[in-house]
Image: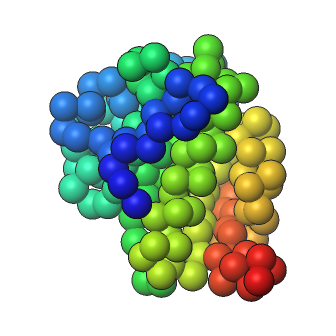
Amino acid sequence: MSPVRKLSDDAIVIRLAQREDAEALASVLYDSFIEFRHLYTAAGFAATALAAEQIVLRINEGPVWVALLDEATIGTVSAVAKDKALYVRGMAVLPAARGKRAGSILLETVEGYAAAHNFKRLFLSTTPFLDRAIRLYQDAGFRRIAEGPEDLFGTPLFTMEKLLTAAREQKV
């Protein structure tokens, strides 16, 4: 996968994050989740709306992508390998940019990376109150599973997965 992916009909560009993107990504995470802050515990919100220093650590752990619209940072997602699976985390799109397919494009980017690196499944954890995100994940083929964790510092969570081998076999 090339580090920059430009889509033809819209101005959304997806590229790998650099350390210099950390402040902008911290703002995206904060601005994307602030409307839900009252539903998180204080520690749960802090673990979701990461500081720039924490984002730099994530960049060192695995790929972090940036979604740009007209050169402005509007979204992000990151991933980290866990055994033969790829854990999707830190997914966010600014409220003003929702509905422009940035979330779908970010998920497609993660799935392409997973396929290129022979991961067998994608999984993520989300909170039950992020309805739009849950619909996005379901539309992308993720299904809720019984695997934990069940909370993030007291904020409820559930896990969703997408089996990549099954998706590839259906296309054949």
Q: Position of residue 96 (x, y in %)?
A: 61, 14
User: Horizontally, is 61 left or right of 106 in the view?
Assistant: left
Q: Residue shown at 80%/80% (left/top)?
A: 170
Colour mapping used in the image: rainbow
- Between 154 and 86, the one nearer to me in the picture: 86
- Between 114 and 159, the one nearer to me in the picture: 114
Residue 145 at least partly seen: yes
Q: Quadrant of residue 164?
A: bottom right
Residue 86 at least partly seen: no
User: Horizontally, is 74 left or right of 52 in the view?
Assistant: right
Q: For the C terminus, which image quadrant? A: bottom right
Q: Position of residue 166 (x, y in %)?
A: 73, 82
Q: Is residue 81 above or below residue 111?
A: below
Report how many numbered discs are placed on residues in the image: 0
Q: Residue shown at 46%/17% (left/top)?
A: 70
Q: Quadrant of residue 97?
A: top right
Q: Residue shown at 53%/24% (left/top)?
A: 11
Q: For the N terminus, which image quadrant? A: bottom left
In the displayed orientation, state which residue is furthest to the front: 8
